Amino acid sequence: MRTVITGGAGFIGSHLVEHLLEQGDEVVVLDDMSTGAPRNLMGSLDDPRLTIEHGSVLDREKVLATVRGADRVFHLAAAVGVKLIVEQPLSSLRTNIHGTENVLDACVATGASLLLVSTSEIYGKNASDKLTEESDRILGSPLKSRWTYAAAKGIDEAFAHAYWTEYGLDVTIVRPFNTVGPRQTGRYGMVVPNLVGQALRGEPLTVYGDGEQTRCFSYVGDVVPAMVRLIAEPRATGQAFNLGGAEEVSINSLAQRIIDVTGSTSHVTHLSYGEAYAAGFEDMRRRVPDYTKAAELVGFDPATRLDDIILRVAGEMHSRERREREPQFVRRQVILDGRSA
């Protein structure tokens, strides 16, 4: 297989790169490195089957040239993270809508199959017991930037479905729920790496709001193989699939689990949403996935326990700090930057 991964230098994308190289694919990464990082691909740098193209999905000709000759495309490139979406709503909308349209057009033109990576954010404030793929979307005002990402990703899915209906594009949609693991950064508001980093530094763990909002966290090592199986499954075409964890946990409980698992001396502190983001910020109280559909079709099983996820994130943070101080890391970083230029 010749596979293109947009956003392949990002958190999930880099794990997908490694997985597909292990399967024998020739992999092309298209990434503008705005939220991804070259160091995420460091472990794959020496593989001759990896090509890194520096570019944006907003560059229509670049996207077409990159996709030409590919068998399949995993589209992960997007403006991500609550902090980034709130601070840069216009560029986020452009990247998430126009960029996706460019990828869809390129796949139609070249005949490549596509896996569109959407998000659980599209469900918005729907706090149902378990969200199925057919659950209603409940979003706040379009004038609140908090819902910009959910709105754009919903449009992406509508585009993808229309391309399947009208052009016969082989496209499948996945909706990850709070995917976590090594290499994820807290830079854009991702809660687990933020809290783990604070715990390891002995700082107070900052929980937004009252902390009683609940989430289900899934491990990247469970999610990525399911994504690959879904793009290869003909019965998945034209459909959306939830990929999420099994354990519902409040953010207060998550913070305490992180303190306990890492052996930190930190304590938990709370910050209002207005202080963290802006006045009038809205969040969802609950988000729990029903992943039955993916489990039945491709055997998706979010088996990795939350404590193990925390340990792996903490271990990678320790290792990264040591590695980035080594001279050979600096040399390889220069090489990778040159290849991605």
Image: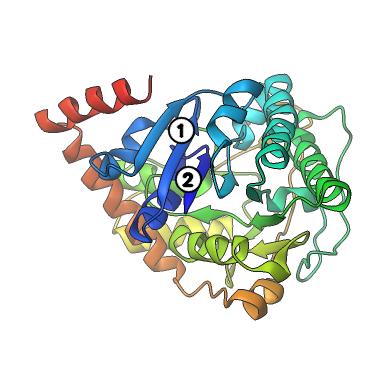
Q: Which mark is residue 56?
A: none
Residue at (40% x, 67% y) in the render: 307
Residue 254, given in percent of the width and then of the height, sits at: 50, 59
Q: Which quadrant is home to the C terminus?
A: top left
Tag 2: residue type?
Gly
**Is residue 181 among the parts visible in the rendering?**
yes
Relative height, residue 309 to residue 91 (above, below): below
First along the sequence among labels 2 and 1: 2
Horizontally, residue 294 falls left or right of residue 50, namely: right
Neighbourhood count class around disc 1 (C-alpha, 10 Å): few under 14, some 14–19, many 20 upward? many
Q: Which mark is residue 36?
A: 1
Horizontally, residue 99 falls left or right of residue 337, namely: right
Q: CA distance from mark 2 to mark 1?
A: 9 Å
Q: Which residue is mark 2?
A: 13
Tag 1: residue type?
Gly
Q: Are marks 2 and 1 in contact (CB under 8 Å)?
A: yes
Q: Residue 258 is drawn in which quadrant? A: bottom left
Neighbourhood count class around disc 2 (C-alpha, 10 Å): few under 14, some 14–19, many 20 upward? many
**Is residue 184 among the parts visible in the rendering?**
no
Query: Which secondary structure lies at badge 2?
Result: helix
Residue 35, given in percent of the width and then of the height, sits at: 50, 30
Front in this rendered view, residue 1 or 182? 1
Query: Which secondary structure lies at badge 1?
Result: loop
Residue 18, given in percent of the width and then of the height, sits at: 36, 52
Residue at (61% x, 65% y) in the render: 230
Residue 222, given in percent of the width and then of the height, sits at: 48, 66
Residue at (75% x, 27% y) in the render: 279
